[in-house]
Image (cartoon, rainbow, N blue to C red):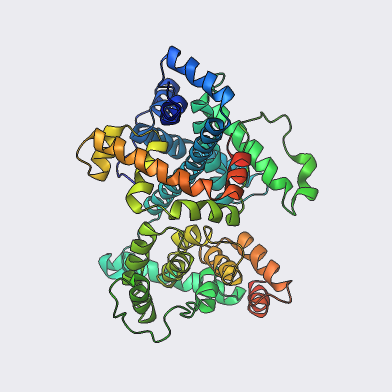
Amino acid sequence: MQKGIYTAVKRTDTDLIESIQRGGQACDQAMAYLYRTYVDRIVQFVLSHQGSAEEAKDVFQDAIISLLTGIREGKFAGQSSLYTYLYAISKNLWYKRFNRSVRADAYRNSLEEGVEDGPDLYLVADDQQHQIHQLLGHLKDKCREVLLLWAQKYAMKEIAEQLGYRNEQVVRNKKNLCLKELKAQVKQHPEVRSLIREMVS
Amino acid sequence: MAQQQFFDQVEAYLDGELDAEARTRFEAALQQDSELAAEVALAEDTRRLLVFATQQEYKEKLRAIDADMEAKTTPVVRPLWQRSWAQAAAAAVLLLIISSVLLFRGGPSSQALAQDSFTPYMDMISYKGSPAIDEDSLLLQAMYAYNTQDYKTALQGFEQILQTNPTQVSARFYQAQSYLALNQPLPALAVLQKLPQDGPLAEATQWYMALAYLMQDDQANAKQLFAEMAQDPNHGFQLKAEALLEKMK
């Protein structure tokens, strides 16, 4: 993780959304800014609704990831402020998790109602994550690194600089080869394909 | 247009890089060729896999940001000898008062309980505990450091292993052990949460997660986990969990 990402300078929602759409390091910095700026408020909400600080942070991390997806897929189009949207997703996520816990029965009636719907989210069991990571684990390190950066919308130039490749064309060729290799792995594991289709739209 | 050319255009089609005419031709071919349709479906599933993996990457980055924030907000206490004599005397008096209160109230702190209950999990990987002759056996080398209580070196080894093979469960499990041994429950917890919930290390993972929570004075989460273990007669850590819950009352 790059040091010095966080800055106290206030950023506008427009600026943050553009950074997220751009991907790469700009997106990482926007994500860091949102987390550092708003995590305390979400912690306060979850703590006041029978949760712990750790649960609150986990919920907020998932909310931010949901926001990134929402922006990239056009589900969030500036209909509210980023904070309002994140808060709504976080509340919804906490409500869903709380309902799965033993505390829900005693507390259900007092929880806030009318939470907004955020993008569809899911909790993935660790064994399912394990299955998926196994597939990626078959790739060599460099392939995995290139593909993950490409999937996070890092520009070819950024990937070349970060991984020490000569130029963008070398990265492009590497990406194409690695994608072909990953596709071959995916083809051999139909059970993971159906899992992935359920989880990612 | 040759059929192979359409197969070569699959990625460009999904990236939206085909011009209008080429896209129209491609989509017409897609309607008629089931093999081409299967290839597009495979490419889409592969991209979905990467999206999922990316979400996990983002999660890791956010956790790292949180750990960084935690580290920066932890107050640093200077040793007594660095303060003035007056401050040192005042601190000593305060300590005496607090100790008396705690003694009167009874009961160890969460951190003390966790430390007393923590024992690094025994080495199930290298049976002799000696340095590996084969230099490629990074795991054995890391376990040697672990067995000789050189946890910092062990952590470096586990980190190196996990960079090349992030699904190496043993490396991750003992990485968490090393963090706990160094009294770093926060990164230990982050690591333990990535471990599978089934398998031979599942019960131990649950036990050490509870200890990590206790080390952070998160009694609520610690108690919940200890209670789950104590209620399961088949759990390997049931008796330990019961004993610890008793002490936490």
Query: What residue is at 58 percent from the left and 43 percent from the top?
Result: A196
Where is the C terminus of chain B found, in terms of image quarters? Answer: bottom right
Q: Nearer the viewer, residue B28 or B187?
A: B28
Query: What residue is at 31 percent from the left and 41 percent from the top?
Result: A174
Q: Nearer the viewer, residue A66 or A8?
A: A66
Quadrant position of residue B171: bottom left
The reply to whether residue B138 is in sight is: yes
Q: Nearer the viewer, residue B140 or B192?
A: B140
Instruction: Please identify the residue farthest to the front as the structure is shown.
Output: B2
Instruction: Please identify the residue farthest to the top as the structure is shown.
Output: B21
Q: Position of residue A122 (x, y in %)?
A: 63, 42
User: Seen in the image, is A196 located left or right of residue B186?
Assistant: right
Q: Nearer the viewer, residue B219 or B175?
A: B175
Query: What residue is at 38 percent from the left and 84 percent from the top?
Result: B129
Instruction: Please identify the residue farthest to the left as the structure is shown.
Output: A166
Q: Position of residue A175 (x, y in %)?
A: 35, 39
Q: Position of residue A102 (x, y in %)?
A: 75, 54
The reply to whether residue A77 is in sight is: no
